């Protein structure tokens, strides 16, 4: 008993020192951020052949060590129906306000290194993977049906031989009255065309209201992983604009066949918000 009384204070001192070093090591290894994200510009929302899209720009800055970023993911939650959707990066965009070549200027995403004393700009496009697969299937079926009409148009041009029907071309009178615009009109009335528009419109789930997004940066080893949460709002006109991209997508193969300018899928710019701090909807 006497020995325990004599050694007690020493044991308590050792435990106190050990507790301090455990706290210090935990704090140094995992209790502090190794990477920080600073957003810039606005949140870009879109819908095209890649499915529902979100584009984010900003800067990543390492706090105290070199960090290897493996990927960046985004989770979207609609305030209206509480549906959660996962977005994955599909491209890096050049750091221009308006890329001159649009999607053609995109670069494939890849892991990258961020070193202390430096910053890394990012401009990343994310898409809903499940939504992309659904849109891809709709467009593939639509293109398949369009090929038949395209074939008839090309045959009509070949038989016509130019702007006006040459004498002795052998073109049947009934066919002579049908030009390519008539064929396009027939195609747009087909069930396949109507169904494609209806399905695309349904897959474009952007509606008027508020959305929450969580940005997750995934790093090698996991020590630098972190998340940031933001909000943004879409107004009634925003949603209508994005829905209008369904028409632009369906017009793409027709415009290509006819050699006319193609409609561009529009994007919406929405300000970053936190909590209830989101811009008022456009009505």
Image (tube, rainbow, N blue to C red):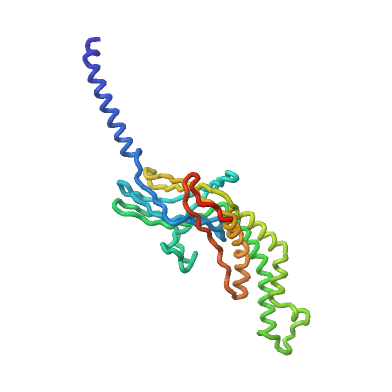
Relative to 2, residue 22 above or below: below
Front residue (pair 160, 252): 252
Is the C terminus in the top left, top right, bottom left or bottom right quadrant? bottom right
From the top left corner, tell me how far across and down residue 266 is, in percent.
Answer: 55, 62
* Residue at the outermost top position: 1
Say which quarter of the image contains residue 175. Answer: bottom right
Quarter of the image with the N terminus is top left
Q: Position of residue 77 (x, y in %)?
A: 54, 46
Q: Closer to the camera, 277 or 6?
A: 277
14 left or right of 225?
left
Point 72% across, 66% down: residue? 189
Q: At 64% from the left edge and 57% from the top edge, which residue is drawn? A: 201
Q: Quick check: can you spot residue 133?
A: no
Is 39 or 30 nearer to us in this picture? 39
Q: In the image, residue 255 lies at what x, y percent? A: 61, 71
Figure quadrant of residue 137: bottom right
Q: Residue at x 70, y 61 (%)?
A: 194
For residue 16, say whether it is visible: yes
Instruction: Give the left or right position of residue 159, taking residue 34 as reference.
Output: right
């Amino acid at each position: 008993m006497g020995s325990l009384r004599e050694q007690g204070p020493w044991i308590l001192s050792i435990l106190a020192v050990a507790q301090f070093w455990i706290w210090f090591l935990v704090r140094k290894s995992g209790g502090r951020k190794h990477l920080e994200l600073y957003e810039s510009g606005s949140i870009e929302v879109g819908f095209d052949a890649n499915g529902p899209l979100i584009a984010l720009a900003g800067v990543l800055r390492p706090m105290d060590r070199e960090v290897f970023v493996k990927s960046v993911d985004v989770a979207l939650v609609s305030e209206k129906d509480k549906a959660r959707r996962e977005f994955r990066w599909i491209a890096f965009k050049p750091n221009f306000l308006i890329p001159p070549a649009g999607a053609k200027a995109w670069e494939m995403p890849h892991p990258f290194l961020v070193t202390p004393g430096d910053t890394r700009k990012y401009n990343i496009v994310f898409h809903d993977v499940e939504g992309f697969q659904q849109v891809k299937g709709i467009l593939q079926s639509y293109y398949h049906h369009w090929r038949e009409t395209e074939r008839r148009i090309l045959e009509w041009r070949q038989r016509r031989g130019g702007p006006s029907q040459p004498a002795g071309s052998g073109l049947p009178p009934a066919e002579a009255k049908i030009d390519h615009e008539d064929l396009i009109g027939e195609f747009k009335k087909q069930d396949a065309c109507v169904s494609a528009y209806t399905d695309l419109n349904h897959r474009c789930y952007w509606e008027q209201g508020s959305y929450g997004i969580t940005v997750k940066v995934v790093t090698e080893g996991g020590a630098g992983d972190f998340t940031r949460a933001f909000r943004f709002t879409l107004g009634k006109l925003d949603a209508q604009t994005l829905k209008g991209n369904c028409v632009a997508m369906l017009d793409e193969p027709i415009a290509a066949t006819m050699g006319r300018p193609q409609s561009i899928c529009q994007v919406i710019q929405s300000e970053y918000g936190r909590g209830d701090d989101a811009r008022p909807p456009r009505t």
